[in-house]
Image: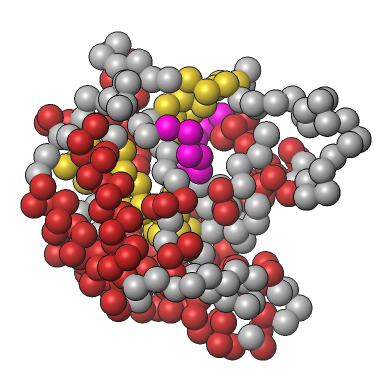
Amino acid sequence: MIKNPVPWPNGARCAVAFTFDMDADSLLHLAHHASADTRVAAMSMLRYGPEIAIPRILDLYRRFGMRQTFFLPAWCMERYPQTVEMILKDGHEIGHHGYLHEEPNRFDATDELYWMQRATAVFERMIGSRPKGFRAPAYQFSRNTLSHLVAEGFLYDASLMGDDVPYVLRNDAGQVIELPSHIGLDDWPHFQTSRELNYRATIKPPEQAMAVYAAEFDAMWEHGGLWIGVWHPFLSGRLSRAVMIGTLIERMIAKGDVWFARLDEITAHVQELIDSGAWTPRVDRLPYYDGPIPELGDARPTNAD
């Protein structure tokens, strides 16, 4: 089913990463700048992430001896420095997730780079090093993002959905390794509903979400893939869902031959395979298109942007 599976370390059948995007209340300030301070219920929902869920998630990882990757908007790092300290103290990775969860494809190339560099400066000031990996807020990777990642020295991206195993994003500026996931492994469609964030869906029981995650894991294990959960502390860190995560990890461990790793560790392994010639990745050349397709011209359907 997977034509080019990665040789994972120690003969593992698949690689697994539980990644959490700790957006906290950046989402509310971005959506409602003038009134966020008075939307107290929504604020409390989002602050649950750094205040309650992150300590719970870190305890869960300690229980299983796992080191994983978190993505934080740099504004959240500045606002919740104690959370940054807790994450790093346990040996986890923090990746770049914008400054205030701004969406890169809403900017021109210059402004996109400004926000990327502003966030990186926070990493250098607070952590003492630049981030190795990037996840575009809301998956909104732009036609300019790859060039910026190359210029800024990033090693990997974790925003796209183009394969079941790592692959390479390449353009004239250079390349980075892509660590893909997909919407089925995101907790947003399973658990999120909010008037303030303009997203309303039927909230699913944890067992239903776990069934989706487990089915994806079983397929990745069977065929040598890469399983990356894209979760949010204020959603999946809620009590019943955190219990579900523990059950899912136990299930994975019981199946055996699973490599649990941080995304920077997965990237390093993949790069080593590429450099040694032991494995050759598929390459996606970006951008996919130079602009709007000419076939439509001005006769765009009414539901187009």
Quadrant placement of the N terminus:
top left
Q: Which residue is situated farthest in the right direction here?
A: 298
User: x, y percentage for residue 165?
Assistant: 35, 32
Q: How is the image coloured?
A: secondary structure
Report the magenta stretch's main SS: loop
User: x, y percentage for residue 247?
Assistant: 18, 64
Q: How many labels sit on residues?
A: 0
- Which residue occupies 32% across, 65% down? 208
Is 153 one of the magenta-colored residues?
A: yes
User: x, y percentage for residue 69?
Assistant: 35, 51
Position of 126 relative to 117 (above/below): below
Residue 103 lies left or right of residue 110; in this view the side is: left
Is 160 one of the magenta-colored residues?
A: yes
Residue 48 lies left or right of residue 98; in this view the side is: left
Q: Is residue 86 visible?
A: no
Q: Is residue 84 visible?
A: yes
Q: Which residue is situated farthest in the top direction here?
A: 277
- Which residue occupies 85% across, 40% down? 300
Residue 80 lies left or right of residue 39; in this view the side is: left
- Which residue occupies 35% across, 15% down? 280
Position of 33 relative to 179 (above/below): below
User: x, y percentage for residue 251?
Assistant: 14, 56
Span of residues in magenta: 150-163
Q: Between 160 and 149, which is closer to the camera in this rendering?
A: 160
Position of 182 relative to 83 (above/below): above
- The image quarter containing residue 174 is top right
Q: Between 236 and 275, which is closer to the camera in this rendering?
A: 236
Position of 296 relative to 229 (above/below): above
Residue 103 lies left or right of residue 259; in this view the side is: right
Q: Between 218 and 62, which is closer to the camera in this rendering?
A: 218
Q: Between 175 and 201, which is closer to the camera in this rendering?
A: 201
- Which residue occupies 70% across, 26% down? 289
